[in-house]
Image (cartoon, helix red, strand yellow):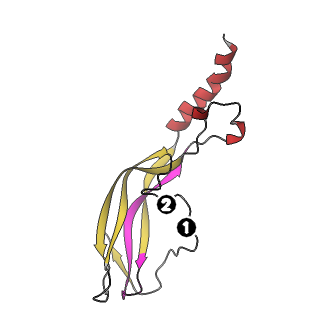
Amino acid sequence: MNPALLISLPFFLALTLGQSMSFCIPVDYVIHVEKRECAYCLAINTTICEGFCMTWDSNGKKLLPRSALSQDVCTYKDMVYRTVMIPGCQHHAVSYYTYPVALSCKCGKCNTDYTDCIQEAGHTEYCTVSQQLYNP
């Protein structure tokens, strides 16, 4: 057997099996939306993409072809946007909030056009004012 083929076979198998073993799926998530001009905080039930995607350590980048190196993240494949109205807002305030709903997910490059690729620091997972639940 060709030595180059013998060496590349484990990488091919790992890549093929890695993608099929990725666990990147839509999961339930609650977004808390709060504005200073509004009397209530809205807790919105939605779905986001979450899970494990196979990645390759770039320490071997000099030995491997560029196509074999990846840093994939669990991201949206199909999604829709929904808009809700936050209750109790002052008349001059923008009381609408638009949020994404994951329909399906994939392992791929993080697209900054519609995904926050950096974990947001200081984000609260709760409301500081009276809460109303919105369940679409």
Please give the label number shown on residue 120.
1
Visible residue check, residue 91: yes
Which x, y percent locates residue 25? 44, 50
Which x, y percent locates residue 20? 50, 36
How much space separates mark 2 and mark 1, taking CA atoms?
8 Å
Most frequent secondary structure within the magenta stretch: strand
Three-letter amino acid code at the position of disc 2: Asp
Do tag 2 and tag 1 residues touch (Cβ < 8 Å)? Answer: yes
Which x, y percent locates residue 34? 41, 80
Q: Residues within 10 Å of mark 1 (few under 14, many from 20)?
A: few
Residues shaded magenta: 33-53
Q: Residue at horizontal 29%, vertical 68%?
A: 83
Residue holding disc 2 = 116
Please give the label number shown on residue 48.
none
Q: Quadrant of the N terminus?
A: top right
Horizontal relation, residue 102 to residue 74: left or right: left
Q: Residue at horizontal 43%, vertical 87%?
A: 129
Horizontal relation, residue 40 to residue 117: left or right: left
Visible residue check, residue 136: no
Which x, y percent locates residue 57? 67, 42
